[in-house]
Image: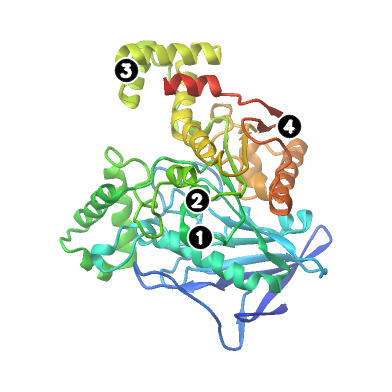
Amino acid sequence: MTEIATPAGRLAGVTLELDGRAVNVFRGVPYARATRFGAPSRVESWDGTQLATAFGPAAPQPVGGPLDGLVPGSFRGPTDEAACLTLNVFTDARTRAEKRPVLVWFPGGAFTTGSASQPVYDGRRFCVEQDVVLVTCNYRLGALGFLDARSAGGVTNCGLRDAIAALEWVRDNIGAFGGDAGRVTAFGESAGGGMVLHLCASPRAAGLFGAAIVQSGATFNTIDDAGAAVVRDALLAELGLGDPAALLDVATDELVRAQAAAALALIPTIGMMPFHPMVDGDVLPARPADALALGSFAERPLVVGTTTDEMRLFVDTSGPQPERERIVKRVAKYLGVEPGRATEVVDGYASALGTDDTHDIWATLFSDVEMELPAAAMRDAHQAHGPVYSYRFGWRARHAALGACHGIDIPFTFGNFVDGWDDFVGADGGAYALSRTMRQAWAGVGYDHDPGWPQAPATMCFDRHVGVVSDPIADRLALLER
């Protein structure tokens, strides 16, 4: 056990070994408390010594559902609505005069699942290998984190407010762990990357971090007032309630069950992530692309990237290839265009990909619309205000049909090929080398605000062969934007 004195009080953590190096780990540190649908209240201090040897419980979340088990390591630990706002700190046990850069990780999970305690997010390797302080954070999820609760006497964007409170705690306390509060980088994958983008857009987060890394998290799905009302009403209907204030008395498990059912019902109208950050005129005055274009993250570096086959994780390509005419109809409906325009797009994708395989054409187009276009929009919005870096992650899953699908970069980020990730990615010496290269780049952002390659449109390709190319999919995106 190791103890440390922070401005908030004494903490007792554990010292663990990794590759012959000692790492001090402080788990389950409470950074805030909150009542249901209430803004978080910072934990400024505590009496005595706070035990920080075990991870705190995660935010309440559903188990099962259409997204569960698509990638390894789904969270299965304890949850607690009242005690989920904790963070974990990983720091080299060796002391040195100069403070280390700090990287703060927000886990993903479609804004409804996940936890900083998942083994794949263990920060020890990143910490000792790259000589940084690593922080991983929990935040409220689903309806508890992202319902517009103003009509129930609560607030908006609880999960985003939690993330801001965590960053404030880091600012005030990280120096005690050897971290430099003036060199904080926020990063995350999927919904965690989305959290980072919305933090970049929030004036309340200004000054709390100086660089951002968004892994497969760019999205146009930010909710507005009208959409938030639809989501709220769907949840109320699932619970058989008319008064939003009654949500305050619903048992946590029942609320989570209703949230999952409502999410399925909302797919045709709101989309796949109805519990999502919203524009509220308070924490979030504008959607990320609009805020970035106005300079919300000015003079700070923004790294935005994707995997090369994002949506193959969600597309079934096991059956026979659909006929070309069927794909044209699907594209026309999906893009909201006339059949002639859809034919032009499908033909353009067939030419760009060099294939008539309609599975490949649809999976690639779906990935481009859902992930690549938003990523490009975020980079373009920030271009006039600060450094912008682009990357694509191309390591392919062992299952060939998945390609370099959404989420495959997660174990590479931390170097933890655990919980089935080793088999999923086909981990070998090349995977471990690529993993280290990726961490070196992210640490470079933390140290010098530079990942080690030129700014966009140059694009770093993280694959078995690492290298920089010009924007590799500009022609495809131009097809969609005509």
Q: For numbered disc 4, what is the local secondary structure?
A: loop
Earlier sequence position, callout 3 versus callout 2: 2
Residue at 69% in and 32% down: 463
Number of numbered markers: 4
Q: CA distance from mark 2 to mark 1?
A: 10 Å
Work out whether mark 1 precedes mark 3 in sequence or the reverse, and give the earlier one: 1
Is residue 43 positioned above or below 448 on the image? below
What separation in Å lies between label 1 and label 3 (alpha carbons)?
Answer: 44 Å
Which marked residue is nearer to the observer: mark 4 or mark 2?
2
Q: Earlier in the sequence, mark 4 or mark 1?
A: 1
Q: Which residue is mark 1?
A: 205
Can residue 415 be seen by looking at this rendering? Answer: no
- Distance in Å between CA atoms under marks 4 and 1: 34 Å
Q: Quadrant of the N terminus?
A: bottom right
- Select label 4 or label 1 by which is in front: 1
Q: Earlier in the sequence, mark 4 or mark 2?
A: 2
Q: In screen coordinates, is 255 left or right of 482? A: left
Give the label on residue 466, or none. 4
Q: CA distance from mark 4 to mark 2?
A: 32 Å
